[in-house]
Image (spheres, helix red, strand yellow):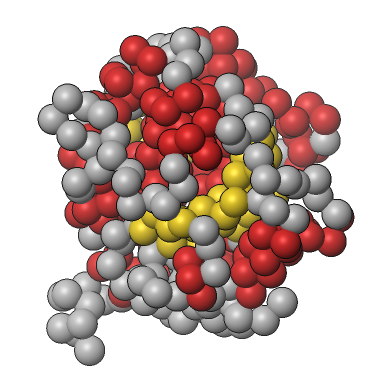
Amino acid sequence: SAAEKGGHDYFMLKEIAEQPKAVADTLLGRIDGAGRLHLDEVRITPRELREVDKVVIVACGTAFHAGMIAKYAIEHWTRIPCETELASEFRYRDPILDHRTLVVAISQSGETMDTLMALRHAREQGAKVLAICNTNGSTIPRESDAVLYTHAGPEVAVASTKAFLTQLVACYLVALYLGQICGTKWGDEIRTVIRQLSEISGAVERVLATMEPVRALARSLADHDTVLFLGRHVGYPVALEGALKLKELAYMHAEGFAAGELKHGPIALIEDDLPVVVVVPSPRGRSVLHDKIVSNIQEIRARGARTIVIAEEGDEAVVPYADHLIRIPVTPTLLQPLVSTVPLQVFACELATARGNDVDQPRNLAKSVTVE
Ligand code: AGP
């Protein structure tokens, strides 16, 4: 009913709008006044965590994209090697795991069969499993050694939105907590980022307030067949997520690429008026990344692409090459996906609606996939 949807036309719109709160709720009570993390609810002791020599993340779909972003964060802040793998591939390749491996299983529903089978396999090999989950008492947290719940509230729309943002928050918390416990040279940065994370929900709110041009752009593209998405670093999984949203909702051919891969093949796809969404990393911090993506935008535009550029406020270098410019707030490099994903969700939702699709119940899909 309309009441259930909180005055929105679709659950998906309601859930997109709930993201600032979902993010804030997932942080609530986990950061103290001095900017230290308290994850005592995670029933793996600091001593056990100090022994971890490898982190393996398993998940499917959107949760897998959160896991890909977590890899950048975990390796940067902890210096512990981390791999992220599709749960459906994981156990079939005989992965190397032991009691010093921490497996992180990410799942909104807690019932995804592929992820469940991966975690069972991990525990049989002696690994410790930490679940990141949005559903209290569901199978995945019940079968794990520990759980860190996301507090997105129930997610009804098939396409995951607010659960994704809270999975990211939980992944950052795990990465920063491991960094805090294990002590790395990034101690000062970790304290700064914890403070920045605690203020991030305001930035998500600001993005939501500026989405009208994104909706108009989406409607104008309803007759296109293909949209490509490019990103680098943590912007790469964001590009994959933007493409997944468009596939599942708009039933369009949508693909995400690491921008550095363009010249290794995908650039051959570029033709006149092809919409290409580019997620641009912050020009501050790792500016090499930023410079490289600006050249990528020039390369595709020279070949006729219609560039849709998502870039930080104040990033002037992209302006001459952007056919459409979507601004996001200035955010620390690793946290940028929390703001850059939001326009892509709105874009996919509006484009799908313009094509006459039911965004809450896309064809052929189920909210939780309980078969392998
Ligand atoms: C996301 O929009 C999808 N519907 C899907 O990829 C989903 O993220 C995946 O099936 C995993 O679900 P889970 O988080 O409940 O395990």
Residue drawn at 36 percent across, 71 percent down: 136
Q: Please, which residue is most extreme toward the right here? A: 93
Q: Is residue 52 left or right of residue 331?
A: right
Q: Is residue 46 visible?
A: yes
Q: Is residue 169 left or right of residue 108?
A: left
Residue 322 position within the rendered picture, expressed as x and y whole percent measured from the top left: 47, 28
Residue situated in front as seen by the camera: 43 or 112: 43
Task: Reply above or below: 23 against 313.
Answer: below
Q: Please, which residue is most extreme toward the bottom here? A: 1
Residue situated in front as seen by the camera: 148 or 23: 148
Task: Reply above or below: 85 against 248.
Answer: above
Q: Is residue 90 left or right of residue 190?
A: right
Q: Is residue 306 visible?
A: no
Identify the image quadrant of the C terminus.
bottom right
Identify the image quadrant of the N terminus.
bottom left
Residue 331 position within the rendered picture, expressed as x and y whole percent measured from the top left: 33, 26
Residue 261 position within the rendered picture, expressed as x and y whole percent measured from the top left: 75, 31
Residue drawn at 59 percent across, 77 percent down: 369
Q: Quadrant of residue 119?
A: bottom right
Residue 40 position within the rendered picture, expressed as x and y whole percent measured from the top left: 32, 46
Total tally of numbered discs in the picture: 0
Residue drawn at 66 percent across, 51 percent down: 127
Residue situated in front as seen by the camera: 104 or 53: 53
Q: Quadrant of residue 122?
A: bottom right
Q: Quadrant of residue 22?
A: bottom left
Q: Is residue 231 left or right of residue 261?
A: left
Task: Reply above or below: 196 against 169.
Answer: above
Residue drawn at 51 percent across, 48 percent down: 66
